Image (cartoon, helix red, strand yellow):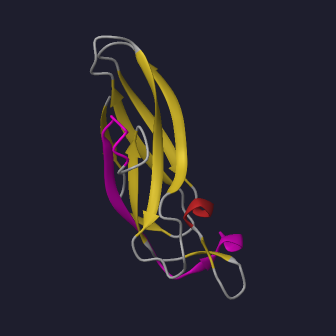
């Protein structure tokens, strides 16, 4: 499995983000894999999971076949829960996004995992107002 990743680097609050990746079977046999997308904020103002699974799909590829996969991150997936009133809010945050065949950093995963960052810009906005 070989991957490439592309996405825009700045995002206005309340917009969805499309993540595209190319997956290639570099082996001599047909096979399948589950491609996963995880996000992690670099500077959240509230507690956040270490990694958040934000999308996944199974892909079946013939030998040397290339496929482009797309995932969409919604404002709800990028919102934080404010501690003082439990309201969901989209805040200016820089996220790291990972695309690969498993949990980033897992030594048992034989697929490569790519990562890059994107930033939500603007003032904090309640998710209900998006």
Regarding residue 9, the answer to whether it shows in the image is no
Q: Residue furthest front?
A: 108
Q: Quadrant of residue 1?
A: top left
In magenta, the rendered stretch is: 106-130
Q: Is residue 117 magenta?
A: yes
- State the residue at coordinates (69%, 73%): 129
Of residue 92 and residue 98, the one placed in the foreground of this image is: 98
Q: Quadrant of residue 21?
A: top left
Of residue 40 and residue 73, the one placed in the foreground of this image is: 40
- State the residue at coordinates (36%, 51%): 7
Name above or below for residue 95 compared with residue 5.
below
- State the residue at coordinates (46%, 58%): 39
- State the residue at coordinates (52%, 29%): 58
Percent across and percent down for residue 66 are: 34, 23
Percent across and percent down for residue 93 are: 44, 74
Name above or below for residue 6 compared with residue 9.
above
Regarding residue 63, the answer to whether it shows in the image is yes
Quarter that holds the C terminus: bottom right
């Amino acid at each position: 499995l070989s991957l490439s990743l592309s996405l825009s680097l700045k995002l206005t609050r309340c917009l969805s983000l499309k993540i595209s990746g190319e997956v290639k079977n570099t082996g001599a046999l047909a096979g399948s894999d589950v491609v996963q997308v995880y996000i992690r904020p670099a500077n959240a103002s509230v507690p956040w999971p270490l990694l958040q699974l934000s999308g996944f799909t199974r892909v079946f590829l013939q030998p040397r076949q290339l496929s482009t996969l797309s995932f969409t991150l919604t404002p709800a997936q990028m919102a934080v829960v404010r501690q003082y009133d439990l309201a969901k809010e989209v805040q200016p945050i820089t996220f790291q996004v990972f695309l690969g065949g498993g949990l980033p950093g897992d030594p048992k995963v034989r697929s490569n995992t790519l990562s890059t960052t994107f930033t939500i810009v603007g003032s904090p906005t309640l998710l209900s107002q998006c």
